[in-house]
């Protein structure tokens, strides 16, 4: 506390400092008030609508009814409804993302359940730390369940022609993933089961009551009886495998197929320049792209007959450039906007008597 008789204090100097500070603040002008929070556009539009409807408070009440601007009120009300509509559309656009996030959460939760029941067959001890990551990757880049099922629907007639999917000629799906193909087969009355090494994927299949097993593909195939399946399918699997594993996979597949059974493999098409140079490498677990001529040769080398290649999923017409009659434009479109995937189908020939 200051004492007025303290000889160390100069009252004149203190008053001079105070006067100097007052002059400085007066020269600087009044302090700016804090900005008021900006009202939500919906609230502001609603306030304008009320003002148009009720009239200005400065107008005497008896005259307000006569001075109401009905047209102005309706215009402001339309703005309010428009804002509401935009928010509804935003919620709808988030709906698909929420569904994908839910699927990813289910997979992650399954990994965290310490008391989960053991799988139907022994699984090799492996690091599952990337399972949830790869499920999220599939949810982001593979497409919705509806999209995937629509892309796979074209294989149903091939299975029907081979009489596959009956109880005595079941279908085995290798690397079944989220189970879209198993779900489609079930919807069409086919007997099918799948397997995948990813525990998060298998958790989703079990949520959908699909017959799916967590297992390594070769560990699952080796103990199976010979001639036990009417069809084996493998969608976007072979590009993940080294050559020796792929050759053994094809040999085991040929062994477990019944005579007349079919093998269907689908993989990215490197003949499409955009796929081979860029899109293929989006998946960090891919090894090397396989040209369709090589894949067809691998099936024939294993013993499959009637091997055919099906080009799949070309880019839409809006991506194509140039005149349709131009050979140069046609070649460019074939290289850059042609089929993004292909399938190779082979048949196990009937046994020789």
Image (tube, rainbow, N blue to C red):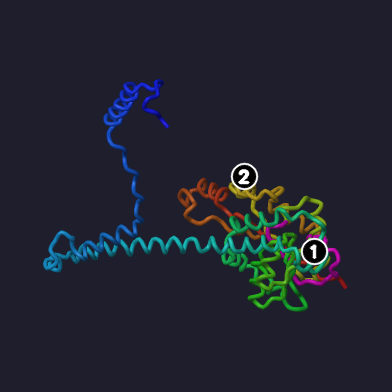
Q: Quadrant of residue 108?
A: bottom right
Give the position of the C terminus as an image quadrant. bottom right
Tell me if residue 45 is in the magenta stretch. Answer: no
State whether residue 108 is above or below residue 162. above
Q: For the point 42% across and 64% down, which residue is it? A: 88
Question: Is any atom of residue 306 visible in this view?
Answer: no
Q: Can you say whether 287 is above or below 263 in the image? A: above
- Looking at the picture, tell me which residue is in the foreground, 225 or 160: 225
Separation of marks 1 and 2 at Cα, in angstroms: 30 Å
Query: Which quadrant of the figure has residue 191?
Result: bottom right
Q: How many other residues sit within 10 Å of disc 1, few (<14), some (14-19) or many (≥20)? A: many
Magenta-colored span: 216-237
- In which quadrant will I find the N terminus? top left
Helix, strand or loop at mark 2: helix
Where, by quadrant of the figure, is residue 154 drawn? Answer: bottom right
Residue 253 tag number: 1
Which residue lies under the disc numbered 2? 277
Q: Residue at x 82, y 67 (%)?
A: 121
Q: Residue at x 63, y 56 (%)?
A: 136
Tell me where residue 285 appears, x and y as whole percent.
Answer: 70, 50
**Residue 10 coordinates in the image, percent (x, y):** 36, 21
Front residue of 307/26: it is 26
Where does the image place residue 116, in percent across and percent down from the top left? 75, 67
Q: Position of residue 29 (x, y in %)?
A: 27, 33
């Amino acid at each position: 506390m200051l004492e007025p008789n303290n000889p160390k204090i100069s009252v004149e100097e203190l008053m001079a400092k105070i006067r100097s500070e007052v002059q400085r603040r007066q020269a600087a002008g009044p302090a700016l008030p804090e900005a008021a929070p900006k009202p939500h556009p919906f609230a502001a539009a609603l306030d304008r609508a009320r003002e148009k409807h009720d009239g200005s408070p400065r107008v005497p009440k008896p005259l307000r009814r006569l001075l109401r601007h009905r047209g102005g009120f309706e215009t402001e009300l339309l703005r309010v409804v428009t804002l509401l509509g935009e928010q509804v559309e935003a919620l709808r656009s988030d709906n698909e993302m929420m569904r994908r996030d839910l699927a990813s959460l289910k997979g992650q939760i399954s990994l965290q359940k310490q008391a989960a029941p053991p799988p139907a067959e022994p699984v090799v001890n492996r690091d599952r730390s990337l399972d949830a990551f790869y499920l999220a990757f599939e949810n982001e880049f593979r497409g919705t369940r509806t999209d995937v099922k629509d892309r796979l629907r074209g294989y149903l007639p091939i299975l029907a022609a081979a009489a596959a999917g009956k109880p005595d000629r079941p279908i085995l799906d290798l690397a079944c993933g989220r189970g879209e193909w198993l779900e489609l087969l079930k919807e069409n009355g086919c007997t099918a089961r799948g397997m995948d090494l990813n525990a998060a994927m298998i958790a989703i299949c079990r949520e959908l009551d699909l017959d799916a097993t967590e297992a390594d593909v070769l560990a699952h195939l080796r103990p199976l009886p010979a001639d036990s399946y009417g069809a084996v399918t493998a969608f976007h699997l072979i590009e993940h495998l080294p050559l020796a594993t792929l050759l053994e996979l094809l040999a085991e597949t040929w062994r477990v197929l019944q005579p007349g059974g079919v093998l269907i493999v689908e993989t990215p098409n490197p003949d499409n320049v955009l796929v081979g140079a860029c899109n293929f490498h989006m998946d960090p677990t891919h090894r090397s792209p396989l040209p369709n001529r090589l894949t067809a040769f691998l099936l024939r080398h294993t013993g499959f007959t009637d091997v055919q290649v099906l080009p799949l999923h070309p880019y839409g017409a809006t991506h194509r450039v140039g005149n349709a009659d131009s050979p140069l434009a046609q070649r460019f479109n074939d290289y850059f906007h042609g089929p993004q995937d292909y399938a190779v189908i082979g048949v196990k020939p009937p046994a020789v008597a």
